[in-house]
Amino acid sequence: MTKQNKPRGLALAALLVAMSFPGLVASQALQEDEPGYSREGADSCFACHDDQQTLAIFRTKHAVPSDADSPFGHGQLQCESCHGPSGDHAGRVRRGQERPASIDFGADSATPIPVQNGLCIECHSADQGSGWHASGHDSDDIACADCHVSHAASDPVMATATQPEICFDCHQYERSQALKPFSHPLREGKMDCSSCHSTHGNSTDTQFAQAALNGTCYDCHAEKRGPYLWEHAPAVEDCGSCHDPHGSNNPGMVSLRGPMLCQGCHSQAGHPSIPRTPDELAGGMPSQYLLSRNCMNCHTAVHGSNHPSGSNLMR
Ligand code: HEC
Ligand code: HEC
Ligand code: HEC
Ligand code: HEC
Ligand code: HEC
Ligand code: HEC
Ligand code: HEC
Ligand code: HEC
Ligand code: HEC
Ligand code: HEC
């Protein structure tokens, strides 16, 4: 799909026309030639569906008559490019007879989700890429409409302040994490899930925004990338080996407090895990921090050190 920069005034004018004179919208339709479709496009629908919510579609990028790719572009099928052929649905119904359905969207719809999504992907295969089809969302039959709202001037999942709520609906564990005392500012609306995740999916295991987990963190925490003279192996490999990125009860969003955090990997290497006397330190030198037990009191440079004598990550 090509992106076009249209003068805003024009789009607004088109919108006003659409709202006040629906007939002008339909005059572009070619629906008579399309079996199963209504004769007059959107005009056929307004007879029964002219509530504010339905009409809100005209305040979105989906109703830009000057955009040939838009459902309301020249030669497109308007409402029915999404809702499918609805000629019978819009037609007369005899008393006692049930109105044939139009295609509805979302988890409660009678239309199977792959069919619903197929209607959207018909126009959006470029945005979706192959990532969507490899994603947990596609394989678990999540609908485009589970995240996106089409009949709204602004789609909440596209705005940072409102996006996380939509994701939390299904991802309850991440919600409980984000409620912990130390977390990324998700609930404050300063960042959203797509700061770290590619929501439509990509080839990484957990749909990271960047090619790998650490690359995703470096987007914002560039100083942790180094290069360091003395690297700390786990920091180079996986920030998640010490941090819970969705939230934690521990300061600094670490998954465990020191010394347990470090003891997960360092047992008695070099000096005992919890040195109590100078003799238990590899260098045998006394230290004022000895009884405080937290490894980070001495090994402050846990992410890596650039100090010439920082090989033990102490400075
Ligand atoms: C003659 C009246 C009438 C016309 C014309 C009409 N609809 Fe409907 N539509 C209804 C009724 C009644 C419902 C039942 C839903 C409800 O209870 O609100 C409905 C429901 C729907 C639904 C929800 C799914 C379903 O079938 O229950 C969609 C989507 C829909 N209409 C789309 C359209 C579209 C698109 C057009 C134009 C091509 C259209 N309608 C024209 C009366 C109409
Ligand atoms: C871009 C695709 C798209 C277009 C174009 C579109 N719709 Fe929808 N429509 C949806 C989706 C998706 C939903 C589900 C709710 C939502 O996302 O807002 C929906 C919901 C509805 C519903 C409510 C069904 C219910 O269960 O309550 C009606 C009625 C409806 N649309 C009618 C129309 C009419 C009439 C038009 C043309 C003026 C139209 N739609 C154009 C995608 C579209
Ligand atoms: C007839 C083609 C067509 C169909 C069908 C269609 N879209 Fe679109 N969609 C477009 C066009 C064109 C744009 C505007 C692209 C742009 O301006 O970058 C768009 C934009 C969007 C956007 C971005 C909106 C924004 O504000 O930036 C979303 C999200 C979207 N569509 C979702 C959907 C969903 C969900 C469906 C199925 C219910 C759907 N589309 C069906 C053509 C279509
Ligand atoms: C898990 C939630 C989710 C699902 C499911 C989802 N989207 Fe999106 N979509 C988003 C978010 C979030 C954005 C905003 C861009 C971003 O942050 O990645 C977006 C952006 C878009 C855009 C704007 C262009 C772009 O790529 O940025 C289009 C078009 C779109 N989605 C279409 C679809 C279609 C079609 C489907 C179904 C095949 C779908 N989306 C399924 C969450 C979702
Ligand atoms: C309608 C329910 C639903 C919504 C809404 C939803 N998801 Fe999901 N999500 C799932 C399911 C189901 C899976 C696949 C099963 C799994 O891996 O947990 C999944 C998988 C994921 C994964 C991949 C997990 C992995 O290990 O590969 C990420 C990341 C994700 N979702 C992020 C998001 C984000 C971000 C949003 C909001 C923009 C969102 N989801 C909205 C249901 C949902
Ligand atoms: C700061 C970056 C970041 C943000 C923001 C973020 N995530 Fe994640 N997410 C990760 C990382 C890193 C993982 C890999 C697993 C781990 O280490 O916990 C992950 C894993 C996941 C998984 C897979 C969990 C599993 O057990 O496989 C889901 C689902 C998920 N995130 C959903 C979300 C949702 C929903 C949001 C928004 C509320 C969100 N994430 C925000 C970084 C982030
Ligand atoms: C979109 C930007 C962004 C990305 C990507 C990001 N962060 Fe953050 N991070 C922040 C912001 C903003 C804060 C809060 C800073 C503050 O409050 O001063 C933060 C804070 C932190 C903190 C300190 C929390 C505290 O309580 O002191 C840690 C640890 C952290 N991030 C780790 C990570 C990890 C690990 C990743 C990758 C999985 C990551 N971040 C990805 C923006 C980001
Ligand atoms: C070996 C464990 C470990 C690894 C691996 C690790 N961190 Fe940390 N990180 C810590 C500890 C410990 C703190 C300090 C926590 C506190 O405040 O008590 C911290 C603090 C932070 C902070 C907040 C304070 C500051 O220094 O800015 C950020 C941001 C951060 N880490 C990002 C990252 C990123 C990004 C990665 C991956 C490149 C990473 N961390 C890997 C242990 C680790
Ligand atoms: C995920 C496992 C892991 C965790 C957690 C971890 N480390 Fe390490 N650490 C390593 C590895 C691997 C090395 C490199 C060992 C080597 O090169 O022999 C290392 C090296 C070190 C070194 C330098 C020693 C040397 O000989 O180069 C120090 C000091 C150190 N870690 C302290 C800590 C502290 C303090 C913590 C807690 C904040 C911690 N580590 C957490 C795996 C871990
Ligand atoms: C009182 C300060 C202090 C505390 C607390 C401390 N260390 Fe050390 N650590 C040192 C000193 C000093 C050295 C360097 C000894 C040397 O130069 O040979 C060292 C060396 C190391 C080394 C490298 C050992 C080697 O093979 O040379 C590792 C790994 C290490 N510490 C891990 C830890 C862990 C894990 C903890 C917490 C359980 C911890 N340290 C707590 C002072 C401390």
Image (cartoon, rainbow, N blue to C red):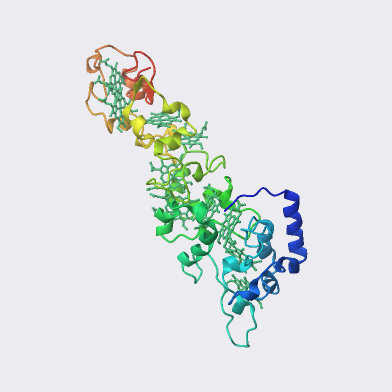
Taking the image in four quarters, ligand 2 sits in the one at bottom right
Q: Which quadrant would residue 136 be assigned to in this image?
A: bottom left
Residue 94, image x, y percentages = 63, 87
Q: Which quadrant would residue 253 be assigned to in this image?
A: top left
At 32% from the left and 18% from the top, the residue drawn is 311
Furthest toward the bottom, the residue is 95
Q: How many numbered circles are shown? A: 0
Is 218 situated left or right of 150 in this image? left
Q: In this rendering, is residue 298 above or below 210?
A: above
On the question of residue 309 being in view, the answer is yes
Q: Quadrant of the C terminus?
A: top left
At 77% from the left and 66% from the top, the residue drawn is 21
Instruction: Name the residue nearer the viewer: 44 or 251.
Output: 44
Instruction: Name the residue nearer the viewer: 279 or 102.
Output: 102
Q: In this rendering, is residue 84 above or below 15?
A: below
At 32% from the left and 14% from the top, the residue drawn is 287
Residue 196, image x, y percentages = 47, 42
Residue 29, image x, y percentages = 67, 69
Q: In this rendering, is residue 196 above or below 289?
A: below
Is 234 situated left or right of 207 in this image? left
Residue 223, image x, y percentages = 46, 26
On the question of residue 301 being in view, the answer is no
Instruction: Name the residue nearer the viewer: 291 or 112.
Output: 112
At 41% from the left and 40% from the top, the residue drawn is 211
